[in-house]
Image (cartoon, helix red, strand yellow):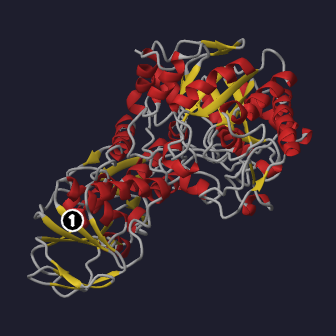
Amino acid sequence: MLKNVFSPIIIKGKTMKNRLAVSPMVTNYCNEDGTCTEMFSAYHEAKAKGGFGMIITEDFAVRPRGKGFKHLPGLWNDEQIPSFREFTKRIHKHDTVLIAQIYHAGRQTSKMVLGEVPQAPSAIPCPFSPDMPEELSLEEIKKIITEFGDCARRAEDAGFDGVEVHGAHGYLISQFMSSYTNKRTDEYGGSLQNRIRFAVEIVKDIRSKVSKDFIVGYRISADEYVTGGRNIGDTLTIVPFLEDAGIDYIHVSAGVYRSFDDIVPSQYRGHSWNTDAAGEVKKITKLPVISVGRINDPRLAETILASGKADIVAMGRQSLTDPETPNKAKEGRFDEIRNCIACHHGCIKNLLNNVPIQCILNPTLGRESEVTLEKTEAPKNIMVIGSGPAGLEAAITAASRGHKVKVFEKNRWAGGQFRIGAVPPGKGEMINYINWQLNELEKLNVPVLMETEVTPELVKKEKPDVIFAATGAEPIIPNIPGIDRPNVVSAHDVLAGKVNTGNSIVVIGGGCVGAETANQLANYLKCVTIIEMLEVIAGDETLVPRWDLLEDLEKNKVRICTKTTVDEITDAGVKVSGAVNEVIPCDTVVLAVGAKPVLGLADALKKEGYDVRVIGDAAKVGLGGEAIMEGFEVGRTI
């Protein structure tokens, strides 16, 4: 079925056992001095064990002032080589081609990270940085070119099979190549030939310092998706110059920091959305082409390869969620693959906060060498109440360790709030994770009893040693005059399909739940207004999904009233004051002002003397990742 995916490919004498690569992703797992750590090594080794044919490690800085994040790897001096020499030996044991991406962040960093202002071709600040960059002198440009070559030489000394020159995503090389960021009038600015000179000279310097069998790849943004930036036509013109300079493959990505949603697209973006750009590059080069961009299923990778648009498919975030994706696919275990849902809540959110990344669906990410699931020597009878992500994760983990587990759910469907969260536009893939959890429990022979409400009598009958109470949360009902009118409903009930609405709707509460519910209703061509007391809506959503949600709300013509308070719900509509003072007419009022834990049963069972462990929203209302981690930890330590 996956004959293209599992066919080998040879680059510079190095054989990739399959066509699946791990694209480079910043983890913040290294020491601040750029040296390797056990955390960094174990994280990559999990992917190598998982069967990926190639791993391209994240941005190795060519100089300290080129770092975009504090805990990046570095090969800017010879003292850093030994720690990575041990790292490469460890990865090569698993028959994996190992590439070090090398880069200079240019303007896309900050004084907070560097201790001094960033450097750039021109004095134009990055939209994500508060600092005006220092324009590079010709002397500094020449020095950085040699630093790229020296960095590549050190990578070869450390045992890497090659390097990937990071000429994408708006970093320094990309800044030189684009008139969006390069306003120089010397030999490195202006004309196309001048703007690509920096990249070409870097590739040539690298080639002069490494062996002929050392791989030199290049990552490029096919389109920068900003006004005045490079587009696919420019890229197709540039690639042959890079090929002549000596690169061995081309890795086709997209975007700069201003178009960050194109670098790391969220769940609002379609799968393999950038593959057509790779296909265009493929038409004008004989080099192997890598396609990347929201590819989270090996069967999708097979389609891309079969289409001839790419030679290799890169899976970045998918390798975070399930580092064993290739092995599972090769064995036909597709229902065991845990798919990335492009939520950004563990990886990108942490990255933007300059802390080590996580994955909300993979509790072991970044803890591969410290977290084990040892078989218990004292199996317990465990009753799990609730089938949300916390309850199901606790059940999976406890059962994996040898405990006897049963899951009870009063509703028809598993998933709790997580399933409800999958209803609005762009969020449907969240269901995949619940399906994965249920499949894991089936493999473990754990019964999941749906439409079964737990009562004290049932608990007595089951005689559990331990109870995991994952009973979730319920909507908060604010004290607003008129709140008890029959046309007032909760966002939870709307998304669950328990109630219908009229055609004119006011949503009270502009957090993520309220905004997504409004988007869902507006998608049905209903007239929707959001009322929010704060200055912004969806402030609890992370950067890119929030951008996409706001764009959808605008497209769906949702009215947004911020800094506005609801005073009363009347026959005429919703009376508001603040930035907006009026009565907004409506058929239906939807409440989305938060949720509170459901603890009645858990408290009653504790009083009866049962050992009750409260997890997920029942412990504290929060995000899905927090609930999953709680479930994993209670199952791991029971």
Instruction: Indicate the secondary structure of the residue bearing disc 1.
Output: strand
Q: Is residue 185 above or below residue 539?
A: above
Q: Residue at x 33, y 41 (%)?
A: 435
Rendered location of residue 228, percent (x, y)? 54, 45
Rendered location of residue 606, percent (x, y)? 38, 72
- 121 or 545, nearer to the observer: 121
Quadrant where the N terminus sits is: top left
Q: Residue at x 35, y 43 (%)?
A: 429
Q: Which residue is mark 1?
A: 528
Rendered location of residue 451, percent (x, y)? 19, 53
- 600 or 239, nearer to the observer: 239
Residue 555 falls in image quadrant? bottom left
Q: How many marks?
A: 1
Q: Name the side, left or right, on which 245 lies relative to 235.
A: right
Does residue 94 appear in this view?
Answer: no
Q: Amino acid at mark 1?
A: Val
